[in-house]
Amino acid sequence: QVQLVESGGGLVQAGGSLRLSCAASGRIGSINTMGWYRQAPGKQRELVATITSGGSINYADSVKGRFTISRDNAENAVYVQMNSLKPEDTAVYYCNADIRRSGVPAPRPYWGQGTQVTVSS
């Protein structure tokens, strides 16, 4: 079985910073794109940032210049450093990864359980 486990959420004042971490474990053959998504109450889940195994990065316009995604391929981990947080960043943040399990030919997406980020004004 493959699992994604997130950590690092919490409550922070506007202008503050948080760092989210996500580690994949289990019978992993390879990991392609990893990323972060978020879902605010009453809204659809949306992209925050993604990073490929080769290091190509994509950010949502709303977080460009404030958030930085990175990954550690040796640790099967992805991180997002969130600076200059705004109340509108409040959401449950989900880790996502395209993982090919050992012995399985095709990758599929996996999701973490989500971690709450709350930014107070």
Image (cartoon, helix red, strand yellow):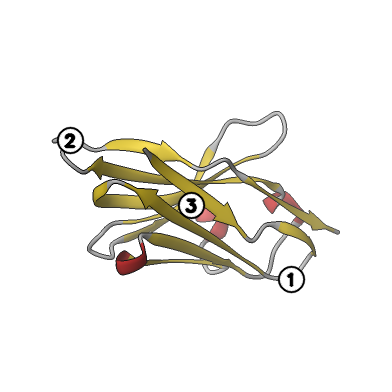
Q: Which residue is mark 1?
A: 16
Task: Say above or below: 48 vs 108.
Answer: below
* Mark 3 closeness class: few <14, some 14–19, many ≥20 residues within 10 Å: few
Q: Position of residue 54 (x, y in %)?
A: 22, 63
Q: Which mark is first along the chain, 1 or 3?
A: 1
Residue plotted at (48% across, 52% down) = 60
What amino acid is labelled 1 in the image? Gly
Question: For residue 40, which numbered disc appears in the image?
Answer: none
Task: Say above or below: 48 vs 14.
Answer: above
What amino acid is labelled 2 in the image? Val
Q: Secondary structure at mark 1?
A: loop
Q: Is the C terminus in the top left, top right, bottom left or bottom right quadrant?
A: bottom right
Q: Which residue is mark 3?
A: 60
| Contact? badges 3 and 1 (CB < 8 Å) | no
Q: Position of residue 87 (x, y in %)?
A: 77, 54
Q: Secondary structure at mark 3?
A: loop
Q: Which mark is first along the chain, 1 or 2?
A: 1
Q: Which residue is mark 2?
A: 104
What amino acid is labelled 3 in the image? Ala
Q: Is the N terminus in the top left, top right, bottom left or bottom right quadrant?
A: top left
